[in-house]
Image: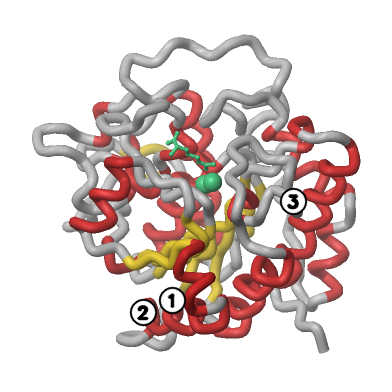
Amino acid sequence: MTFGQPFTGTDMGPELLMQKGLPSMLSNLGWRVDRVPEVLGKSFGSSSSSSPPPSTSNAKNSSLVGLGALSLAKLCLKKSSSGNFPLTLGGDHSISLGSLAGVLRSRPATGVIWVDAHADLNTPWISESGNMHGMPVGLLMEGMIPEGKKVEEVEGLEWLGEGWEGEEGWPAYKDGEKPPVLKPSSIVYVGLRDVDKEEREAIKSLNIKYYSMYDIDRLGIGAVMEKALEHLLKDDPSRPLHLSYDIDAVDPGQAPATGTTVRGGLTYREAHFVAERIANSGNLASADLVELNPTLSDDVGAEETVDLGLQILTSMMGKSII
Ligand SMILES: NC(=[NH2+])NCCC[C@H](N)C(=O)O
Ligand SMILES: [Mn+2]
Ligand SMILES: [Mn+2]
């Protein structure tokens, strides 16, 4: 998926990670890997496809982003319902609208750790850029859709609304079932350093827990992760967790090959510690790694970023130093 942001090449991440040995790295950790090669066809979201239809709202390419997210939501719903761990490789961060919606539908108690330079809490009604990779949290969060507006009015997002009629893999919401939503108290941000004005106001008014780079500098990453886990697990120690890891959380010195770099990010060890500590909780049940774009850097930078992505993935899936 590339349609959630302006650059081509974001769809190349998964193939590179697979080629560089992710499946065997995961099986070496004891996982049985069931690879689903592409969620949609090869041509979908590919850099070479012709330009997508214009959007009717301030959500660029919403019909394609929505279609991609729905396909992924179906898959994650199916996999999580049967007790599997859906590990989603992106692609831009708009795909997390799908993975998270799918996981939340089968495991509504899921708590989310969002590791990112950005809050991705925009909606079409407040976004300055209209890029949907800045909206996956906002579109799912309770209290983010303005009065009188509905998420299902956004072209492509009909499946997230109450009136959804249902289709194979994503049935209608019935018997009091609500479309997937995320409560403000069910997410913790780690690594924030570039937050839009409206997002900042929403974080404050909804009382969303966050640990920005300032907090990481002040408290240290160890204390930050203890607090983050405590916040999500205090009432239910066996709560399933979803980790959404945007590679741009990491400092651009370590991860240059991504579309919206922001200086002053996580160090190499901090980036790993976040994943290691969450894995160590034993609660991690689903995850995404997104926003790798090898075309946005020189060859060395691209290789380093893909390699870092692989290492972070193995850390979150349980690799320990000793
Ligand atoms: N997943 C990302 N890299 N998101 C960047 C979002 C940047 C900005 N806040 C926007 O909404 O356009
Ligand atoms: Mn980001
Ligand atoms: Mn992001």
The label on residue 228 is: 1
Q: Amino acid at mark 2?
A: His
User: Which sits earlier in the primary sequence, circle 1 or circle 3?
Assistant: 1
**Residue pictured at 51% horizontal, 70% vertical:** 216
> Is 290 situated left or right of 93 in this image?
right
Q: Amino acid at mark 1?
A: Ala
Q: Nearer the viewer's eye, disc 1 or disc 3?
A: 3
Report helix, strand or loop for mark 2. helix
**Residue pictured at 67% horizontal, 29% vertical:** 41
Q: Is residue 123 above or below residue 143?
A: above
Based on the displayed image, in which of its 4 quarters is residue 83 positioned? bottom right
Residue 84 in view here: yes
Instruction: Report x, y in % for residue 319.
Output: 76, 78
* Crowding at mark 1 (Cα within 10 Å: few <14, some 14-19, many 20+): many
Q: Amino acid at mark 3?
A: Gly
Report helix, strand or loop for mark 3. loop
Based on the displayed image, in which of its 4 quarters is residue 27 positioned? bottom right
Q: Which residue position is annotated with label 3?
A: 253
User: Which sits earlier in the primary sequence, circle 3 or circle 2?
Assistant: 2
**Residue pictured at 43% horizontal, 22% vertical:** 60
Instruction: Report x, y in % for residue 70.
Output: 46, 39
For ligand 2, tell me if the residue under mark 3 lies within 8 Å: no
Q: CA distance from mark 3 to mark 2?
A: 31 Å
Q: Which residue position is annotated with label 2?
A: 231
* Crowding at mark 3 (Cα within 10 Å: few <14, some 14-19, many 20+): some
From the image, which quarter does the N terminus lie in?
A: top right
Residue 112 in view here: no
Q: Is residue 34 above or below residue 292?
A: below
Instruction: Report x, y in % for residue 172.
Output: 29, 44
Q: Is residue 6 above or below residue 89?
A: above
